[in-house]
Image: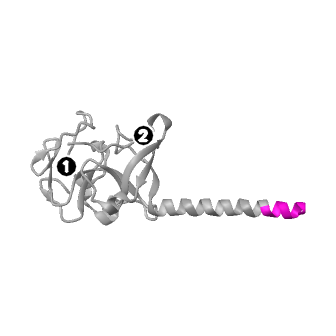
Amino acid sequence: MSIISKTGAVFFDFIETIVIALSIFLVVYLFFMQPHQVNGQSMVPNFQSGEYLLTDKVTYRMRNPERGEVMVFHAPQSAHCAKGTGCDFIKRILAVPGESVEVKNNGIYVNGDRLAESYIPDSYETLAGEFSRNRVINLGANEYFVSGDNRPYSSDSRAWGPIKKEDIVGRVFYRYWPIKAIGKIVKADY
């Protein structure tokens, strides 16, 4: 076998490896999990701007989202994201289909009971937004009430209403950057 033949074989083996690796990456990215970067301060103190998260795209196909989970979803039109940016938000689920939500007395009330939210500091003020001011919100089938953990700096369901299940990208399950914050994302208990 000549040097040219050996070089060509090595080159084609390399190309084959690259194509297989890219194919596997594409299948995983499109159907199983997707990386997301936190942009902004809406989830402080639990998520910082610039952190990288993995979003599980399979779980919500097998079961419904649950209160306390952190998820990524396509921003509603009323959130006024720049056109063509593919704007996704990261927020915490506070209420699920069939529940009622009210924002009052510096807190979130679900079915009349105030949520005990130990993951946010007492100093964070929870005010009603344009959508949730002076009203009880009754969630329909496939509607979720979501909010950022940093209530004073979060554009969320208080401002633009519930999100629909079909807009959900997936459940945030792992933080992989920065190294000091690596770990599994745990659902909040109420």
What's the residue type where badge 1 is placed? Ala
- Residue 51 appearing in the image: no
- Where 151 sits versus 169, above or below? above
- Measuring from the top left, give residue 40's x and y in whole percent: 40, 46
Number of labels in the image equals 2
Relative image position of residue 112 (x, y in whole percent) = 9, 49
Query: In the rendered structure, which disc, 1 or 2, sits on the residue that comes first in sequence?
Result: 1
The span from disc 1 to disc 2 (Cα, nearest Å) is 32 Å
Q: Which SS class for mark 1?
A: loop
Q: Quadrant of the C terminus?
A: top left
Q: How many residues crowd around disc 1 within 10 Å: few (fewer than 14), some, or many (20 or more)? A: many
Query: In the image, which residues are magenta?
Result: 1-9
Instruction: Give the x, y percent position of residue 21.
Output: 61, 59
Residue in view at x 47 percent, y 63 percent: 30
Q: Is residue 18 left or right of residue 180?
A: right
Q: Residue type at mark 2?
A: Gly
Determine the main secondary structure of the stretch shown in magenta. helix
- Residue 125 visible within the image: yes
Residue to which mark 2 is pinned? 183
Q: Which mark is residue 159?
A: none
- Residue nearest the viewer, comparing 123 with 34: 34
Task: Name which residue lies at 38% across and 50% down.
Answer: 172
Q: Is residue 157 above or below residue 50?
A: below
Cβ atoms at labels 1 and 2 below 8 Å apart: no
Q: Position of residue 54 (x, y in %)?
A: 44, 50
Instruction: Give the farthest residue toward the front.
Output: 1
Q: Which residue is mark 1?
A: 128
